[in-house]
Image (cartoon, rainbow, N blue to C red):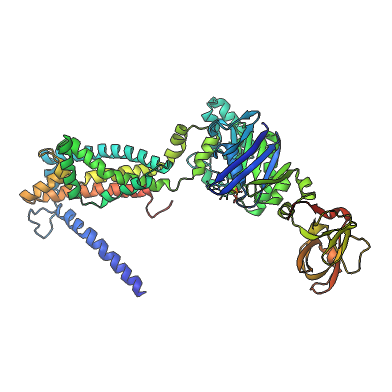
Amino acid sequence: MIRHAFARAYLGLILIFLYAPIAVMAVMSLNASEFYALPFRFSTEWYERLFTNDEILAAAWRSVWIAVVVAIIATALGTMATLALWRHDFPGKRILQALLFPPIAVPWLITGTAMLIFFFGVGIGRGTPAVIIGHVALALPYVIVTVFARMQSFDRALEEAARSLGARPLTVARKVILPHAAPGIIAGALFAFAVSFDQFVVSYFLAEPGDSTLPVLIYSAIRKGFTPEINAVSTIIILISMAVMVLAARYAKFGGTR
Amino acid sequence: MSEVRVEGLTKAYGPTKALDDVTLTFPEGGFFGLLGPSGSGKTTLLRAIAGFVQPDHGRIFIGDQPVEGTAVEDRNIGMVFQSYALFPNMTVAENVAFGLEVRRVPSGDRARRVAEVLELVQLGPLGNRKPQDLSGGQRQRVAMARAIVTRPRVLLLDEPLSALDRALRVDMQIELKRIQREVGITTIFVTHDQEEALTLSDQIGILKDGRLVRHGPPRAVYDDPQDAFTAHFLGEANILTGRVEAQGLRLTDGTLLPGVTTARIALRPEALTASIEQPATPHRLQARLVQRIFSGAMGTCILDWQGQTLKLTAPDRALAALPETGGPQVWLSWPAGAALPLRDPR
Ligand SMILES: Nc1ncnc2c1ncn2[C@@H]1O[C@H](COP(=O)(O)OP(=O)(O)OP(=O)(O)O)[C@@H](O)[C@H]1O
Ligand SMILES: [Mg+2]
């Protein structure tokens, strides 16, 4: 009983630490006062200002389309890589698989620096292409992990059944393997979108000034002076990111029904 | 429909020989039961015929054509898997139509053939269901329908009934046999269950450690097992050993069994008769009754002969004269032809 109560309190504390700052930010984005003054007076002023701020709108649009492009590229590459890893045994496969995960643990600051140096070295330099390539590299392991996890539940007999019925490898892939992988692929795409959309460090290093994504723009704005507008845009970002994650979790079937 | 023939088929996985020089003909239109203990190579043989396993040596013919160089998808086989392997994203009808679709059968023709075969397996109205919404027996029928709708040259079944519970399994055995008869397709059937094999097959083959030990019609193999492994594996057997003399077989307790010319014989439990009085026949021996077990219509006696356990089964009525609990010496006798000679070296 006591352990039970303790566990509940623990979970409660975690949720408070996770969500309280976000809640405060969301509430303040709807407060009329520019200086966080209480009592709370409801106002949508900051949201209205947001939607007339061309700089923020442009950055938001750039963030979204970059995230979409990154999601498409990372999902396509990641899915093909996963199916190859899943399907075939080849020399060095284990090493290759092991090498996919460390980048997730490397601090983004260091990854960003390394990418910047590398991109200058190979002549790509800074700019939107560099941002996209960088994001794809960051997102790829997430796609591979998600799709691979999904493929673990694939019954190999399905593939053999299809072949025994006369289906050639491409037909097997299209009609049997891909339909099974689909939820994993969708979840992977959503993760890739989120990784790109939320990315600050690597974007900060690789974007050219004036071509910022939303997180980079927010960072520069905060340095100049904090306004409730930032609360408003951050609240929107949080809502989008959370929605994407909830969807991804649903498709990846985390801790739920099969 | 074609005869299937394997010649000198050998497949090794490291030191284990999953198949060891297997030569066997599966007759056209017949129902062939492959039996053997776990790990004896049954699945490997089936998968070699299907094309999923590449043999190290030997040849495989379907009809007159050698198929070693032919990919699975071009061998024109039907296969039913232990897990059924129905495509979960497709309906029953789509599952069944799959093989026709990849063969580019026109859609009108396709629909007709799917309907026909669903009728044959008695699933007519369930075409729009998803496999998840079917019972085990229904899934089994879908798997059968999907495998035969393409009119394959051979139907390969790897323990297709093992996932079903006992009562349903017996029903499905009858179904399977009916469907196979109606379609007349050459069928190779792997099973652990010897009774199932005896019931269904026109021919059986018994594998042990990758080698084909025996094959032939079920009754012929059962009535003349020829070696101790087959005698034990197919049905039950009491095996007696002795010394061959001019007059017959001299058992270790001195009993002489006239007319026997091999050092070992097998006696089926159901061939034995037990009595308190000494029977007139010379085909008898004396053993101690350990236990008499009632199990419905049939009864079983456990006996001890020279430290060896013997088993007898008979209708319970026939055993009524014997005491319930063990102890006394009783006589076991059998008809002259029931002593099955075993010729394999020990
Ligand atoms: N892919 C494989 N790799 C290594 N060994 C294998 C492989 N497939 C089969 N074997 C081995 O070959 C032998 C025969 O296996 P097989 O699956 O054909 O037996 P089986 O008669 O079907 O057994 P069961 O009744 O348990 O299904 C076994 O010793 C098995 O361990
Ligand atoms: Mg097997």
Which residue occupies the foreground of this view, B48 or B276?
Answer: B48
Which residue occupies the foreground of this view, A110 or A170?
Answer: A110
Which residue occupies the foreground of this view, B313 or B340?
Answer: B340
In this view, which residue lies farthest toward the right?
B280
Above or below, A222 against A213 in this view is: below
Q: Position of residue A206 (x, y in %)?
A: 15, 41
Q: Position of residue A11 (x, y in %)?
A: 30, 64
In the rendered image, is residue A254 in sight? Answer: yes
Q: Position of residue B233 (x, y in %)?
A: 71, 53
Above or below, A38 against A216 in this view is: below
At x 16%, y 55%, the residue is A25
In this view, which residue lies farthest toward the left?
A224
Taking the image as shown, residue B135 lies to the left or right of residue A25, namely: right
At x 62%, y 31%, the residue is B151
Which residue occupies the foreground of this view, B300 or A7?
Answer: B300
At x 86%, y 55%, the residue is B260
Position of the N terminus of chain B, as image quadrant, is top right
**Which image quadrant for residue B241?**
bottom right
Q: Position of residue A105 (x, y in %)?
A: 25, 52
**Which image quadrant for residue A14?**
bottom left
Taking the image as shown, residue B111 lies to the left or right of residue B344, namely: left
Position of the C terminus of chain B, as image quadrant, is bottom right
**Which image quadrant for residue A33?**
bottom left
In the rendered image, is residue B94 in sight? Answer: no
Taking the image as shown, residue A197 lies to the left or right of residue A226, namely: right
Taking the image as shown, residue A129 lies to the left or right of residue A33, namely: right
